Image: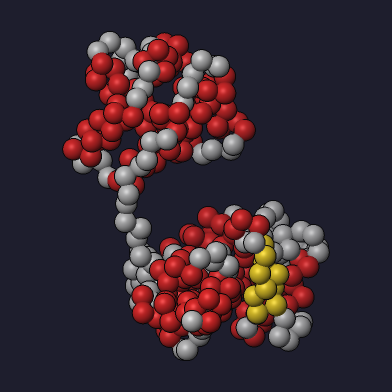
């Protein structure tokens, strides 16, 4: 950490980071990134005004200081996404300070706006590649139940459009889909929004094969998908399985678990699926998000909007 930061402010920064690690379960990587981000701003502040950056200098930060910092960072090839993360870290630190010091006004920092950055467009797999992934995702694993487990997860991502967190959030009670033709999954998605997702036969069969081979009891309230030692399945293991099958099949780096969800939406739309219905299946709050997922053009988006909006129908 830079020597241009006062000892008191340096200690405060370390206390905040310690709390993030202890209470918010932030990873070591996140802690290191936040430390570097905040230290970079404080170092700039010291050089900008002269002398070491201390609590008084941080307390006196104005909007123009933040703009100067961001302009300096961009001039030194700092990307908009990276700078947005740095500003988020700085806001978190300032909010923490304001909670502990009545005379610390974080308004200027908290009201700063990050530079806009282009969201990368999703890159779905083609239908043959998506099917190949679900059929051979963990063919390199020796344990049959592990292969069946990863196949079931991948099939739920592609066949039902689930997020990986939603698939791994299923419990033993959801295993009933394997025995109930035409069953649906009740999914609690982002923001606590609940939705019903129909389960295609391939997904039900994949889950049935997994539950038949799983060496651990399928308890109603326990996680459906288990790790090697019986605990909840870590999503990182599915990510690694995707990395392996991606290499074996010669697929691009964009072939991630989330790409299977994108593929679900895109392939459904290409086969005549209704954009509004796909929005509901994915659990998107806004139709524009579904538009990005599927790559649908604006004309088709407006067509779906006009067909669904009550005022549009009246006109």
Picture coordinates of residue 250, whole percent (x, y): 34, 72
Image vertical order of residue 201 relative to residue 65, above or below: below
Total numbered badges shown on the rendered structure: 0
Picture coordinates of residue 53, whole percent (x, y): 34, 15
296 and 298: which is toward the camera = 298
158 and 91: which is toward the camera = 91
Q: Does the image show residue 74? A: yes
Residue 43 lies left or right of residue 219; in this view the side is left
17 and 225: which is toward the camera = 17
In this figure, which colouring scheme has been used for the structure? secondary structure
Quadrant for the N terminus, please: top left
State the residue at coordinates (73%, 86%).
Answer: 181
Residue lying farthest to the bottom in this orientation: 272
Picture coordinates of residue 226, whole percent (x, y): 67, 60
Residue 224 lies left or right of residue 54; in this view the side is right
Image vertical order of residue 87 relative to residue 8, above or below: below
State the residue at coordinates (40%, 81%).
Answer: 300
Residue lying farthest to the left in this orientation: 75
Residue lying farthest to the front in this orientation: 315
Q: Does the image show residue 3? A: no
Picture coordinates of residue 42, whole percent (x, y): 34, 22
State the residue at coordinates (51%, 15%).
Answer: 103
Image vertical order of residue 144 relative to residue 104, above or below: below
State the residue at coordinates (47%, 16%).
Answer: 11
């Amino acid at each position: 950490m830079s020597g241009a930061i006062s000892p008191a402010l340096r200690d405060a920064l370390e206390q905040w980071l310690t709390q993030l690690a202890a209470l918010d379960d932030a990873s070591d990587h996140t802690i290191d990134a936040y430390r570097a981000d905040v230290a970079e701003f404080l170092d700039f502040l010291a050089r900008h005004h002269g002398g070491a950056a201390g609590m008084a200098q941080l307390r006196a930060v104005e909007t123009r200081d933040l703009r100067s910092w961001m302009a300096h960072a961009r001039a030194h090839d700092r990307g908009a996404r990276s700078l947005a993360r740095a500003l988020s870290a700085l806001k978190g630190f300032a909010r923490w300070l304001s909670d502990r010091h009545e005379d610390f006004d974080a308004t200027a920092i908290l009201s700063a706006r990050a530079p806009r950055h282009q969201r990368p467009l999703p890159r779905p797999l083609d239908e043959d590649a998506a099917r190949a992934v679900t059929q051979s995702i963990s063919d390199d694993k020796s344990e049959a139940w592990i292969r069946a487990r990863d196949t079931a997860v991948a099939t739920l991502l592609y066949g039902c459009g689930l997020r990986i967190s939603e698939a791994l959030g299923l419990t033993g009670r959801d295993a009933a889909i394997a025995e109930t033709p035409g069953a649906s999954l009740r999914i609690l998605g982002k923001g606590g929004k609940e939705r019903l997702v129909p389960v295609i036969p391939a997904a039900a069969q994949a889950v049935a094969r997994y539950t038949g081979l799983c060496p651990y009891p399928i308890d109603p309230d326990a996680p459906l998908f288990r790790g090697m030692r019986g605990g909840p399945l870590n999503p990182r293991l599915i990510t690694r399985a995707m990395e392996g099958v991606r290499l074996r099949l010669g697929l691009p780096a964009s072939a991630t678990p989330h790409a299977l969800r994108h593929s679900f939406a895109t392939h459904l739309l290409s086969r005549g699926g209704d954009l509004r219905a796909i929005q509901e299946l994915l659990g998107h709050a806004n139709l524009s998000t579904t538009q990005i997922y599927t790559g649908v053009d604006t004309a088709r988006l407006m067509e779906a909007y006009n067909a669904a909006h009550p005022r549009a129908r009246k006109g």
